[in-house]
Image (cartoon, rainbow, N blue to C red):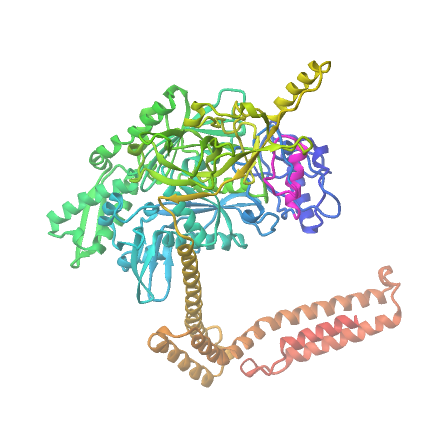
Amino acid sequence: MPSRELSRSTPLTCVSLERSRAAGRRQAARRPPSPGQRRTSPGSRPLHWLGGLELAGERRKRKPHVEPAKELVAVSGNFCPLSHFSLLAGGRDFRAQAGRQAGRGFCCGGLGEGCTCSGGEPSGEAAGGSTPSPAASGAGSPAMAVVGFDLGSQSCYVAVARAGGIETVANEFSDRCTPSVVSFGSKNRAIGVSAKNQLITHAKNTVFNFKRFHGRTCNDPFIQKEKEHLSYSVVPMKNGNVGIKVMYMDEEHLFSVEQITAMLLTKLKETAENNLKKPVSDCVISVPTFFTDPERRSLLDAAQVVGLNCLRLMNDMTAVALNYGIYKQDLPAPEEKPRLVVFIDMGYSAFQVSACAFNKGKVKVLGTAFDPFLGGKSFDEKLVDHFCAEIKAKYKLDPKSKVRALLRLYQECEKLKKLMSSNSTDIPLNIECFMNDIDVSGKMNRSQFEEMCADLLQKIELPLRSLMEQTQLKVEDVHAVEIVGGATRMPAVKEKIGKFFGMDVSTTLNADEAVARGCALQCAILSPAFKVREFSITESVPFPISLLWSTESEDTDGMHEVFSRHHAAPFSKVLTFYRKGPFELQAFYSDPGGTPYPEKMIGKYVIQNIAAQNDGEKTKVKVKVRINTHGIFSVSTASMVEQMKEEENENHSVKAVVDAQNQKPSEEDINNFIQQGNHEAGAQPQVQTDGLQTSQSPPSPETPSEENKIPDARKGNEKKNDQPPEAKKPKIKVKNVELPIEANLVWQLGRDLLNMYIETEGKMIMQDKLEKERNDAKNAVEEYVYDFRDKLSGTYEKFVCEQDRHRFSTLLSEVEDWLYEEGEDQPKQVYMDKLAELKKFGTPIEARYQEAEERPRLLDELQHKAQNYAKITDEYRKKDEKYLHIDETEINKVEKCVRDTMEWLHNIRNAPSKAKSRSGSCVCVSEIKAKAEGAAQLL
């Protein structure tokens, strides 16, 4: 970007930022530019980039100059680090103005006041995701956070967008991986690492592997099969959904899977807030590609319980593709042949593959395939079954008879699997006191393991072959194969994938964090707080969806597949029906066998308040169906076309003007819908709905638009100028009336139940906070006891007399015994009072120690200053030119002050110091500081 364009930006007023920017420019000037990178002039202000992100800078004092959107986001060459800009105070108008000046569809999504953004390219859903509304995103808030959550079956990751780019943050244990485990105790909950540490000791009250329970009933075959491998109790709730029964606060509680996931999200949200030092609301959450509508709605409800505004449920593979593509500088141009990359993710519980087409600034998901029951867990179960049989034969023990023993075996087998991935030799397995105080041992090597898992390895090819067939791709078309997920680290898995594609697999992405980073990038795209390089994302519909409706003939029903498999998403279609009264639409999955969900029905939608026309004819009804950014199907709107006669002198502000004689629909139009929007995602938007630009098909043939009709009328008038006027035919005014839609979804959490979950979660968060404060107060007392007792016989020994030391040591021992007896479980205030009692003795000792440590330094500083002033007076007496301007009386004052100060210092240093440190009768630090301040004022 030319420097003359960049230099127009208003400089920040913060001095520290100006210095930081100047230092950055000096460092950039010393560094030679990379190929293709332009050097900015020293006076210009460069845009700062990393990973396509830039924080909007703060503008003050004058109206900001905004370059076209292309100049704001396009960068050539390498990235530069982001500067620590503050958030743009007027972010809404800034984005709106940028879009209007660009004139190319960079819509602010309603963030600008009186949004008039329009252009030739899609924005919103089609161009990198939908832009959130102010209410949803908190636009303009300087505390906005950009966060991406990767919710895994076994572990979770949190990525945030900072001024330096995308970063995966660590939890309180300095670990970026947070286990997906929730444990319940008598006082509070433990979530994450602390919960996993309690998995063995509190197996019945520790919940894990619950991600796949979303949107399912308790009698689901998958749930019934999973119950056999769980240590906690899974029971049906009143509505038939999955309930998890645990003991919490010494009472039996029944939690839904939404509540359990909300608890995990609470921990992830806390981790993000602790790292960002700001509240977190907006986020993007990952979801498996094969999740159906009920599962996705359930996950959204869980996010709502914890107060998170999920801007998008992003498919795992799409997040990986975004993380891969947005950093690539060598992608083909939009008009060139796209680069095809296959992404493969084998996590703990599922195997997902995706084929994506990349061009500069955009990615399109061509298709996906998956095996939802093949993952690292499947390989762990093979090892567990093997060692269970070996232990039973060798030690006459049955690990499956005891939950704790089985969980320990699972943990050890998982460690063994990871070791075999990097070692081909025999790896031992040793577990002490496994059962009945008996130690068990075993061993296995990689070749034995691969032979044991041969059937699992064979399953890897099925999704790969399915993907290539569905997308009609050849292996030769694939440019690269990127693998992510923990289970892809197994050499046998890599070998199978590489053999299928005939190339070496690529591991350029972080196998664990790629999904979270992609989610954070998507959240940055949707957030007005960041400017991200233009990158359009076109999703793919994993399962075909059809609509069913009743017709006049009682024997037949109308049916149509509205979204085929691998259809582009997000996407909207408009269907037209002719009805005299309300009617029902049923949405369902067209291919139940290919959907990993037992219920094929999505929901029933009743279009209400439909009435026949005044002449008794059927009314035209337009119904919009869509797949939104979350990948959820819905019947979003319905409208009825009403016809009314219009007077000649009325205002002709109508949607369409038609001849009354041409309004009768044909029989074919009556029996079938006649209009279907069939555009590609990314086509030019024609209608704006819900703040998002979506496309709509042209008007139906029997309803020509006004602009098409009027020229014909003018031609007719020209021909009839020489003829006598005829009586004008009545014209019809057509208007659309919005119709209410009653949606009855297969799975839906009621508002009252959701509010109850929100209230319950709030109470549990408060209880966790109170318990943490109580434990912190207890730990503070214990820490003070141990710390002071050691120092009494060491550092503080000469600052306390023998009698006081003996008495204080006795008190410390008594408090220590109290902590492990009566004080084991006391309220917070009791611990605070006990600490205050100890500090009555300890604080004076600490003060004397600090005085003794600081006193020599302050005395030396005071003496050094006095000597410097004495040197100045000596040079004055020697007629030094530097001090001849000083008056003689002033020098006399300085000399007197120096003499007094040196005399005071001499008396202090030579005063008897015996027992002064213990009694505290020596000169205090405060006296030295006062003396220094008094001398400074005089001088």
Q: Give the answer, above or below, for where 629 lies relative to 477.
A: below
Residue 318: horizontal and vertical position, in percent? 44, 35
Between 822 and 591, the residue placed more toward the observer is: 591
Drawn side of residue 319 relative to residue 494, left or right = right
Residue range corresponding to the magenta coloring: 89-114
Q: Name the quadrant of the C terminus.
A: bottom right
Drawn side of residue 426 relative to residue 546, left or right = left
Magenta span includes 435 = no
Magenta span includes 97 = yes
Who's the residue at 47% across and 55% down the image? 270
Residue 13: horizontal and vertical position, in percent? 71, 49
Give the tally of numbered discs.
Answer: 0
Q: Give the answer, above or below, for where 6 lies relative to 658.
A: below
Who's the residue at 15% across and 48% down the image? 391
Drawn side of residue 241 relative to residue 872, left or right = left
Residue 672 visible from this viewpoint: no
Between 488 and 560, the residue placed more toward the observer is: 560
Q: Give the answer, above or below, for where 83 lies relative to 796.
A: above
Drawn side of residue 180 relative to residue 621, left or right = left
Q: Name the quadrant of the N terminus.
A: top right
Residue 503 visible from this viewpoint: yes
Between 866 and 238, the residue placed more toward the observer is: 238
Residue 876: horizontal and vertical position, in percent? 84, 65
Q: Quadrant of residue 504?
A: top left
Who's the residue at 87% across and 60% down the image? 881
Residue 409: horizontal and vertical position, in percent? 23, 50
